Amino acid sequence: MAKRSQSERRPLNDAVVQRVFLSASVPLPSRNAAYFNTADVIAIRDAVRALTIVIIEQKAQLVFGGHPAISPMIRLQIAQAGMPVGDRVVMFQSRFFDRAFPDDNAAFERVILTDAIEDDRQKSLIHMRETMLSGTFNCGIFIGGMEGVEEEYEMFRRLQPGVPAFPVASTGAASAMLYNASTSLKKQHPELQEEFSYITLMRNLVYPRRPAGRSSRRRK
């Protein structure tokens, strides 16, 4: 795939009805045990795949930062759909990680590369995230994760004031911590903890006009 710089990329498709931001990762045992010990890897996988299905079937747009554990999940679901998705799935990646780009990147029709900043990892990540979170979003969905998901959650809330941010607590890790720290989320969105039919959950989050009551199927 030809690499496209930030200045060369074409604008995102504004005709898309819903634009959804995803932040997700699978916690590593070598990192903070608080994330790894509470993570539900199967739930993380199922939630990411369900969101991708909803994006494809509803012709919405998914925006996310490339991640070695999450990108293959999304790629697999796109492949199983058996149709081109074009601008409906947009992956951002910083050139700081150029040498470590996974092969899965080539499977995405829309990859936006942002410049490395002063050969500094953190500055490059901030630049990519600020670029990725520009424009209008309908909601942000946060799944599993570690420090990066927490950072993107705070940045999303700062750059997208008033836009719903949904940490899926049932996937554990950082998302559970974010959910449990919010009294309003626990009161208004118990389904983020209780709903394990992730297709149902994602449809209700992306298209909230549909009733989103308590869990239709809960894990025992």
Image (cartoon, helix red, strand yellow):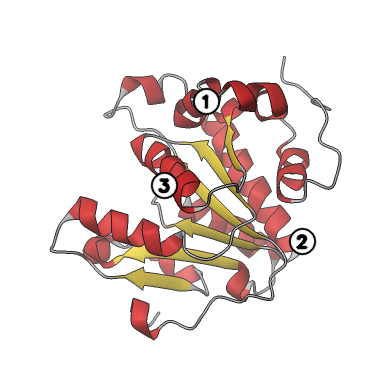
**Residue 189 location, quadrant:** top right
Q: From the image, tell me which residue sits under label 2.
A: 58
- Disc 2 to disc 1, C-alpha distance: 27 Å
| Residue found at x 71% / y 44% | 205
Q: Amino acid at mark 3?
A: Met
Could you say where residue 112 lies in the image, as x and y percent from the top left? 41, 72
Where residue 14 appears, x then y in whole percent? 63, 75
Looking at the image, residue 94 lies above or below residue 7: above
The residue carrying mark 1 is: 176
The residues bearing labels 3 and 2 have C-alpha atoms spaced at a distance of 27 Å
Q: Please identify, in this view, whether the residue under mark 3 or under mark 2 is nearer the observer.
A: 3
Going by the numbered disc 2, the residue's amino acid type is Gln
**Residue 154, relative to residue 60: is it above or below?**
above
Task: Count residues near mark 1 (Cα–Cα under 10 Å), then give few for <14, some for 14-19, many for 20+.
Answer: many
Dot 1 lies on which element?
helix
- Going by the numbered disc 1, the residue's amino acid type is Ala
Q: Earlier in the sequence, mark 2 or mark 1?
A: 2
Residues marked 2 and 1 touching at CB (< 8 Å): no
Is residue 99 found left or right of 47 in the rendered image?
left
Q: Which residue is mark 3?
A: 155
